Amino acid sequence: MPLREWRLRIQDILDSIREAQEFTAGVSFEDFQANREKKLAVERCFEIIGEAARHIPPEIEQRYARVPWKRMRNMRNVISHVYHRVEDQVVWDTLHDDLPLLTPMLRDVLAREQEAEGAGG
């Protein structure tokens, strides 16, 4: 299987963030908790986010150390491997507290790297 370019992986993360937010737009925590389809859809988004983060090159991770690469991978691992203990409140809080902050960070990574390439770096 050919390797996907890391920028596409970051775009996968951004797309999954957007989708998770769309799935829960206008939804209360109680409605989220009661809706198995929404929970599974959002959990799938977190799995994609973590899997994509796993394929970011170490030099990019080091250059952008404030991006929570490890936390993204850890969230995916919990959802995938300890699925029976996933806490709805943690998923909800991460969705609303952390993902909105992650989007501009990742857009910044893409923009800076594009600038560096344009400057011959």
Image (tube, helix red, strand yellow):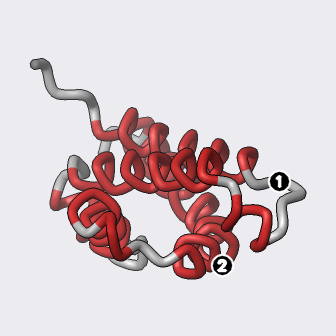
Of marks 1 and 2, which one's residue comes earlier in the chain? Answer: 1
Instruction: Decide which of 10, 45 is in the foreground and name it.
Output: 45
- Residue kind at label 1, given as amino acid type: Ala
Please identify the residue farthest to the right as the structure is shown: 26
Q: Which residue in the rendered view is the most extreme toward the left?
A: 1
Query: Quadrant location of residue 34?
Result: bottom right
Q: Position of residue 75 (x, y in %)?
A: 35, 69
Where residue 108 appears, as percent x and y from the top left, is: 55, 57
Q: In which quarter of the image is the N terminus?
A: top left
Q: Is residue 6 left or right of residue 18?
A: left
User: In the displayed structure, would residue 1 be above or below residue 32?
Assistant: above
> Is residue 106 rendered to the left or right of residue 58?
right
Q: Report the residue at 83% width, 53% height from top.
A: 25
Amino acid type at circle 2 is Asp
The residue lying at 42 percent from left, 71 percent from top is 67
State whether residue 69 appears in this view.
no
Give SS at disc 2: helix
| In-image side of 77 versus 72 (left or right) | left
Q: How crowded is mark 1: few (under 14 residues within 10 Å), some or many (20 or more)?
A: few
Residue lying at the far top in this picture: please name it: 1
Pinpoint residue 85: horizontal percent, then vertical percent. 35, 76
Under circle 1, the secondary element is loop
* Residue of label 1: 25
The percent position of residue 121, horizontal first and vertical second, equals 30, 45
Locate residue 93 relative to residue 65 in the image: left or right.
right
Image mark for residue 97: 2
